[in-house]
Image (cartoon, helix red, strand yellow):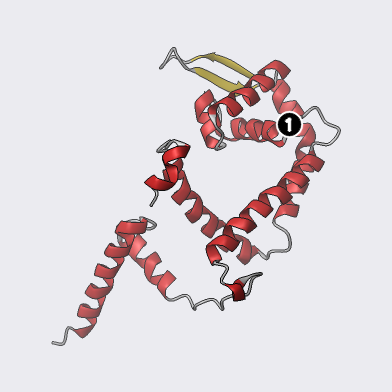
C-alpha cells in the first residue's frame, strides 16, 4: 500500500498547527483545519496600486491611513444622522444601541465594548443618565460596580432616530457587493480580534510600542 497521500496530509496538518499556534485564527478541530485548507486554496489577489507605492510606501501605512479616513467619513454621516435631534454625539446613540442589543451591563463593560478610555466613557454615561436615557443600579455581584440599562425614554429617543442612523450605516458600506461586504467583515473581524487582545492587556501608552515589538 502506498502512503504518499497520507504523508502529504500529515505535512499539511503540521503546517496548520504551526501557523495556527501563532495567529490562533482557527479552531484546533477538524472544522478549523478544513477552513484553513479552504483559505489556502483561494487564488492570490492581484496586488493593487496605491499613492506613494512607487516611492516605497508600505501596505501597512496605506491600511492605517484608510482606516483613519473611513472613521472620519463615518463620523460625518453620523453627524448628519443626529442633526437636529437631542443627541450631542454619535457615541451617545452607539452606547444606547449597545445596551439595547446586549442588555444590562456594568459601566466598564459598556465603555470597553466601545473601546473608550475610562474618563471619556464615564462622561458619556453621565450625560445619558442626566438625559434619562439610561438608568443605573448597584450590582448584586459586586457592590462597587453599577449596572446600567437603557430606559423606555432611551428606547423612544433611539427609535425616533433609527431611520437616519440606518441610512448613515448603509452609506458607509458604499457600493460594495454582498460578497465584498462578507469578505470585508471577515478581514475586519480578524484585525479586530488581533487588536482586542492587545487592548485588553491595558498597557500604558509609554510602554505600548516597546511591549509590541
Choose top left, top right, bottom left or bottom right for residue 37. Answer: bottom left
Residue occupying the point 79% across, 32% down = 160
Could you tell me if residue 163 is visible in this image? no
Residue 81 versus residue 88: which sits nearer the camera?
A: 88
Residue 208 versus residue 145: which sits nearer the camera?
A: 208
Left or right relative to 131: residue 123: left
Left or right relative to 147: residue 34: left
Percent position (x, y) of residue 210?
Answer: 39, 46
Percent position (x, y) of residue 201?
Answer: 40, 38
Residue hosting label 1: 158
Could you tell me if residue 24 is visible in this image? yes
Q: Secondary structure at mark 1?
A: helix
Quarter of the image with the N terminus in it: bottom left
Percent position (x, y) of residue 110?
Answer: 55, 30
Left or right relative to 198: residue 148: right
Residue lying at the far bottom of the rendered structure: 2
Left or right relative to 85: residue 29: left
Depicted 139 relative to depicted 2: above or below: above
Residue occupying the point 42% across, 37% down = 203
Amino acid at each position: 500500500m502506498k502512503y504518499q497521500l497520507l504523508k502529504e496530509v500529515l505535512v499539511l496538518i503540521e503546517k496548520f498547527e504551526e501557523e495556527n499556534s501563532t495567529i490562533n485564527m482557527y479552531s484546533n478541530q477538524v472544522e478549523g483545519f478544513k477552513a484553513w485548507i479552504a483559505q489556502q486554496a483561494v487564488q492570490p489577489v492581484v496586488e493593487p496600486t496605491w499613492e506613494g507605492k512607487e516611492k516605497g510606501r508600505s501596505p501597512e501605512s496605506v491600511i492605517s491611513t484608510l482606516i483613519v479616513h473611513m472613521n472620519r467619513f463615518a463620523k460625518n454621516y453620523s453627524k448628519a444622522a443626529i442633526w437636529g435631534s437631542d443627541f450631542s454625539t454619535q457615541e451617545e446613540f452607539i452606547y444606547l444601541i449597545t445596551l439595547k442589543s446586549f442588555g444590562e451591563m456594568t459601566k466598564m463593560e459598556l465603555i470597553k465594548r466601545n473601546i473608550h478610555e475610562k474618563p471619556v466613557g464615564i462622561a458619556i454615561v453621565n450625560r445619558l443618565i442626566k438625559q434619562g436615557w439610561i438608568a443605573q443600579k448597584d450590582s448584586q455581584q459586586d457592590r462597587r460596580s453599577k449596572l446600567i440599562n437603557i430606559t423606555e425614554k432611551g428606547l423612544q429617543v433611539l427609535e425616533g432616530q433609527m431611520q437616519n442612523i440606518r441610512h448613515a450605516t448603509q452609506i458607509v458600506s458604499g457600493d460594495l457587493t454582498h460578497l465584498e461586504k462578507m469578505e470585508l467583515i471577515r478581514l475586519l473581524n480578524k484585525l479586530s480580534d488581533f487588536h482586542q487582545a492587545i487592548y485588553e492587556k491595558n498597557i500604558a501608552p509609554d510602554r505600548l510600542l516597546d511591549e509590541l515589538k
